Amino acid sequence: MMNSSLRVKPSPALLLLLAVMVVVVTPFAASAQKTWSVARTADGDDFNSVHFADSRRGWIVGDAGTVLRTTDEGATWVSQTLGTKASISDISFRTKDDGCLVAGASVFCTADGGGQWRETTKFNPKNFGGLTPELTSLTFANKRRGIIVGSLVRRDAVLDSLVLLTEDGGETWRRVVVETKDEMIDVDFAGDERALAVGAGGTILRTENGGRSWSLQASGTRAVLYNVEFRSGRKGWAVGAGGTILRTTNGGETWTAARSGVRSTLLGVRFTNDDDGVAVGRGGVILRTEDGGNAWARQESGTTENLFALYASKDVWWAVGAKGILLRQER
């Protein structure tokens, strides 16, 4: 009769495998549990984007012309007057001193590190067949080349997409006609020539010539895509409605879905390298990956407010969202 209390001694190979599993799994589990702290909450206008031009100087932009500036790595934030009450959706710097932001149908730029801003372009509906332009995202590849995406609307109905290109540092912009009428929501460069834009209906557009022409890419989803991020010319990620996360390893030619583990709409994604990334979304959802976006783990955000955007400065993750909430986590 077999003794039910008999224990089999693990083999050396099995012990080694278990040790390797502990080494591999434990760091990710630990980092996934890192907490976020509330750095600021104004209980007012939504914060839509956060950006740092260097290690000390950063900006938060949002609804009703909100602009906040820090010069001490985010320890304090001071309000700036832009001269508009339009919603500011995005901000980008092409150098540590030269940057632009988009507010409604206007582009504002600075040449002194954000000390002063001037309206450089105000797009008129008459230039778009009577449709009102709404600008949602802005990015620069270098000192001269930049792209804006958005939509053309009439009475709040989106009737066409909008892609704009500058090759003189934001002084002038020209429209580039693309193959979709879906609203384009976000754009990011993956080098000086390659850029990807995402939007409604799972739309992904790709350019290989700096934004002069674009082609539609198969995304495999109809979910609205809200944000796209590239860390190199080939690896990129996009997030969207229903917990959608897409990955590419070939510069956006093909995309595959990753399991997020949530159904909440994801609105922002950022990576600090090819492996370490964070995604945020509605209801205060924050997800973390350390394997390039294959696996994601939930982090405690401490809020149920919608989180719209992310930025990774030198030592800190920043997240902004509804009602003026600003979260931070030490990297």
Image: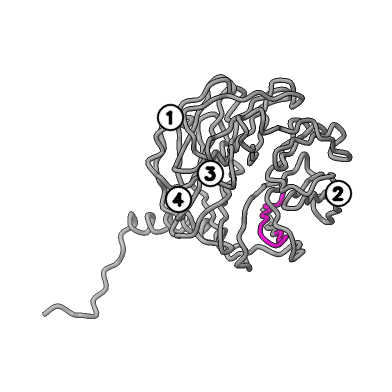
Q: CA distance from mark 1 to mark 2?
A: 41 Å
Place residue 22 in its image quadrant: bottom left
Q: CA distance from mark 2 to mark 4?
A: 35 Å
The kind of residue tagged 1 is: Glu
The kind of residue tagged 2 is: Gln
Magenta range:
314-326
Task: Residue 210: say if magenta.
Answer: no
> What kind of element bears circle 1?
loop
Place residue 33 in its image quadrant: bottom right
Q: CA distance from mark 2 to mark 3?
A: 36 Å
- Mark 3 or mark 4: name the one nearer the start of the chain: 4
Q: Which residue is mark 3?
A: 275
Give the side of residue 41 with respect to residue 35, left or right. Answer: right
- Mark 2 or mark 4: name the one nearer the start of the chain: 2
> What kind of element bears circle 3?
loop
Q: Which residue is mark 4?
A: 244
The answer to the question of whether label 2 and label 3 lie on touching residues, with beta carbons closer than 8 A, is no
Q: Nearer the viewer, residue 125 or 47?
A: 125
Q: Foreground mark, 1 or 2?
A: 2
Q: Position of residue 250 (x, y in %)?
A: 45, 30
Residue 111 image label:
none
Q: Is residue 312 above or below residue 284?
A: above
